[in-house]
Image (cartoon, rainbow, N blue to C red):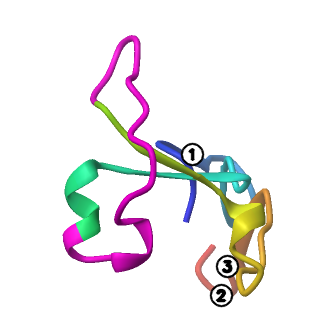
Amino acid sequence: MTDDASYLLNDGKERMVTGNCHQVRFRPSAAELFPEVHGLEITPRAAGKPSIELPTALLPHMICAQTAAHRLSGIF
């Protein structure tokens, strides 16, 4: 889970994805699916849609990492 973007890095021996692991961003309608975000502040975005921004530090049960990788073996 990342902020509003994740990036798949090319040209490596591993499939690697990187993104902002310190914040997750939800649309206000996410409160219908995730009651935990109901009532949280909606942040207006200068160049985008309104969002509920949640620091992952408030989610102690989550393990955060800037990147995630899966080693490719036997494919190339």
Q: Amino acid at mark 1?
A: Tyr
Locate residue 49 relative to residue 62 in the image: left or right.
left
Q: Position of residue 65 (x, y in %)?
A: 80, 66
Q: Position of residue 59 (x, y in %)?
A: 69, 74
In which quadrant of the rendered view does residue 68 lie? bottom right
Q: Which residue is mark 2?
A: 74
Task: Sort mark 1 into few (<14), some (14-19) or many (20+) by Cα contacts within 10 Å.
Answer: few
Task: Sort mark 2 into few (<14), some (14-19) or many (20+) by Cα contacts within 10 Å.
Answer: few
Q: Amino acid at mark 2?
A: Gly
Closer to the camera in the image, 10 or 39: 39
First in residue order: circle 2 vs circle 1: 1
Q: Which residue is mark 3?
A: 72
Q: Which residue is mark 1?
A: 7
Q: Residue furthest top?
A: 46
- Asked which secondary structure carries label 1, the reply is strand
- Is residue 13 visible from the viewing direction of this image? no
In which quadrant of the rendered view does residue 60 lie? bottom right
Q: Is residue 52 above or below residue 60?
A: above
Q: Amino acid at mark 3?
A: Leu
Residues at discs 2 and 1 in contact (Cβ within 8 Å)? no
User: Does 40 lie within the magenta span?
Assistant: yes
Q: Which residues are magenta?
A: 32-49
Closer to the camera in the image, 39 or 55: 39
User: Does 16 lie within the magenta span?
Assistant: no
First in residue order: circle 3 vs circle 1: 1
Q: Is residue 25 above or below residue 56?
A: above
